[in-house]
Image (tube, rainbow, N blue to C red):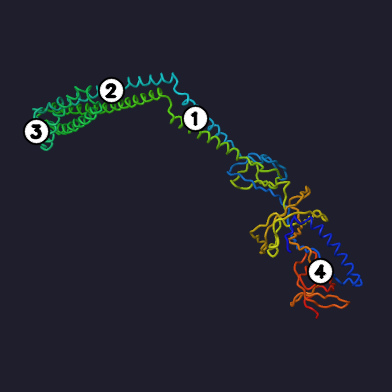
């Protein structure tokens, strides 16, 4: 029965082989006596047939690592050289981290500020802060009242300027200006311009009357609405004055007025326009100041309410998030600094080192190779014709070229399921582990492997040189009473020592002539 040759059978096999060897020797001795000590005779005996595969491999460390940085940079220090022994965690190469250290200092300051603010929120408003908030709210109220009062003055001034511009500067050359039938006191050659001017003057009278009423009631109504209406009326007066200016600018002394009078009209209208424009500028400035004061007062009032209420849970949660963000930034930079140093992943020896101090390196470029010292394995490639007979836990005899005559024992620990092409030939990688580590064994040694792939125990065996194999089959010359007879036989497994399993055709104790392998039978 075929069995895998594993550790389980290694030592029982030794005993079995000794017993069978002694038993076979006795039978063989007696047969040789019967064969008159003829060395060309072999005897069919029971024994063990062990199949082997022989390959050559190399010792390699089980632990191998090619180390590289996850980012680029300039090398600042190189701590090791090829051949140096290192321990797990030992620094090997370090990049320049000065810019990272500056970022870390800034991040630490931000973290401290976030922590302080969080502590302040959790503590609540101090009495001093509350007093400051109340003072600011009071100051805001005063500023708002002042801005409102100033705006009221500006609004009244805008009416006064506009009223003077229309009823003083313009009405001096208009008859019946406050009626529905006003007239220009001199001849205007452009009748359409004159008509537009008189229509606007009639409208101006209504505007000024309503404006005067609003100006007298400024403290009673909505100031914001008064500002809007004043802007509207000022622009209406401004447009009316533009028409008046066009009329007087076309006026000549021959139109029924002296040059002095014409110049006076022009100067007065120009002054009126300037006054109204000034009113618009003053209104815009005062309105802006009032609105800013209003906003500031509202803000200070809310700040006071917030100070009185203390920090909300939402504010504390938000600041906690800010603190966590700052702390994460610190941790990230510290991690960057830590990753700027290559460290040994395990105890071993440096087998390669590429970096030099000052050199700039790219990310993921291997710079250092480290190999383990104690855990070694043997790697070999097996041709595809033999790989089907090899499996995990197969027993292996190992002979190193460096230690001739010494036999080491091992076991197949891994058979690669994927092929490896070597010189166009399909091979499969296997790993062999030594049963007992030997500190003399070094990485790179050549190892000759004899892999016991299968065994058959207590089977009939015969040396292969006693068989005749040709196209017609396999035969043996059986010697009986000094006469040989050619008999067909069926063979099974073939051992690495030349022994062949006899499945049928011969019996235990049969004497067979040693004829050597032949291409064809002589009979």
Asked which secondary structure carries label 4, the reply is strand
Q: Earlier in the sequence, mark 3 or mark 1?
A: 1
Q: Earlier in the sequence, mark 3 or mark 2?
A: 2
Vertical arrangement, residue 24 with respect to residue 297, above or below? below
Quarter occupied by residue 129: top left
Residue behind mark 1:
114
Vertical arrangement, residue 425 with respect to residue 95, above or below? below
Q: Earlier in the sequence, mark 1 or mark 2?
A: 1
Residue in front for this viewpoint, 187 or 509: 509
Residue behind mark 2:
148
Asked which secondary structure carries label 2, the reply is helix
Q: Quadrant of the C terminus?
A: bottom right
CA gap, disc 1 and disc 2: 40 Å
Residue behind mark 4:
462
Mark 1 nearby-residue class (10 Å; few <14, some 14–19, many ≥20): many
Q: What number of labels is visible?
A: 4
User: Residue 72 location, x and y as percent?
Assistant: 58, 44
């Amino acid at each position: 029965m075929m069995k895998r040759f594993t550790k389980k059978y290694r030592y029982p096999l030794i005993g079995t082989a000794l017993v069978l060897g002694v038993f076979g020797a006795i039978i063989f001795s007696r047969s040789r006596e019967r064969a008159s000590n003829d060395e060309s005779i072999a005897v069919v005996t029971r024994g063990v047939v062990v199949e082997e595969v022989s390959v050559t491999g190399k010792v390699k460390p089980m632990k191998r690592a090619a180390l590289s940085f996850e980012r680029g940079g300039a090398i600042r220090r190189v701590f090791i050289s090829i051949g140096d022994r290192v321990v797990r965690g030992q620094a090997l190469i370090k990049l320049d981290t000065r810019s990272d250290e500056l970022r870390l200092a800034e991040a630490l300051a931000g973290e401290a500020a976030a922590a302080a603010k969080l502590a302040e929120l959790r503590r609540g408003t101090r009495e001093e802060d509350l007093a400051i908030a109340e003072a600011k709210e009071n100051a805001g109220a005063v500023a708002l009242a002042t801005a409102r009062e100033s705006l009221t003055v500006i609004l009244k001034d805008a009416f006064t300027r506009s009223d003077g511009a229309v009823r003083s500067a313009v009405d001096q050359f208009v008859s019946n200006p406050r009626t529905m039938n006003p007239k220009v006191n001199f001849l205007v050659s452009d009748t359409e311009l004159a008509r537009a001017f008189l229509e606007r003057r009639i409208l101006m009278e209504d505007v000024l009357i309503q404006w005067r009423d609003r100006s007298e009631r400024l403290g009673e109504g909505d100031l914001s609405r008064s500002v809007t209406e004043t802007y509207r009326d000022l622009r209406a007066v401004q447009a009316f004055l533009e028409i008046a200016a066009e009329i007087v600018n076309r006026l000549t002394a021959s139109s029924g007025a002296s040059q002095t009078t014409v110049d006076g009209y022009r100067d007065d209208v120009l002054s009126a326009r300037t006054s109204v424009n000034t009113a618009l500028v003053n209104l815009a400035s005062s309105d802006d100041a009032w609105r800013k004061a209003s906003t500031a007062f509202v803000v200070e009032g809310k700040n006071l309410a917030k100070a009185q209420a203390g920090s909300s849970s939402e504010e504390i949660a938000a600041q906690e998030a800010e603190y966590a963000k700052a702390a994460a930034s610190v941790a990230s930079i510290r991690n960057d600094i830590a990753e700027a140093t290559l460290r040994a992943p395990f105890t071993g020896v440096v087998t390669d080192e590429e970096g030099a101090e000052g050199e700039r390196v790219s990310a993921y470029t291997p710079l250092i190779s480290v190999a383990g010292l104690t855990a070694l394995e043997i790697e070999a490639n097996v041709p595809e014709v033999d790989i089907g007979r090899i499996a995990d836990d197969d027993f292996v005899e190992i002979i190193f070229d460096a230690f001739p005559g010494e036999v080491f024992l091992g076991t197949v620990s891994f058979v690669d399921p994927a092929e490896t092409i070597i010189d166009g030939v399909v091979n499969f990688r296997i790993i062999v582990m030594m049963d007992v580590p030997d500190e003399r064994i070094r990485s790179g040694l050549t190892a000759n492997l004899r892999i016991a792939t299968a065994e058959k125990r207590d089977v009939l065996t015969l040396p292969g040189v006693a068989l005749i194999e040709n196209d017609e089959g396999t035969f043996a010359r059986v010697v009986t009473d000094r006469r040989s007879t050619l008999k067909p036989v069926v063979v099974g497994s073939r051992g690495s020592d030349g022994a062949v399993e006899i499945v049928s055709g011969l019996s235990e104790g049969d004497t067979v002539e040693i004829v050597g392998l032949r291409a064809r039978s002589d009979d």
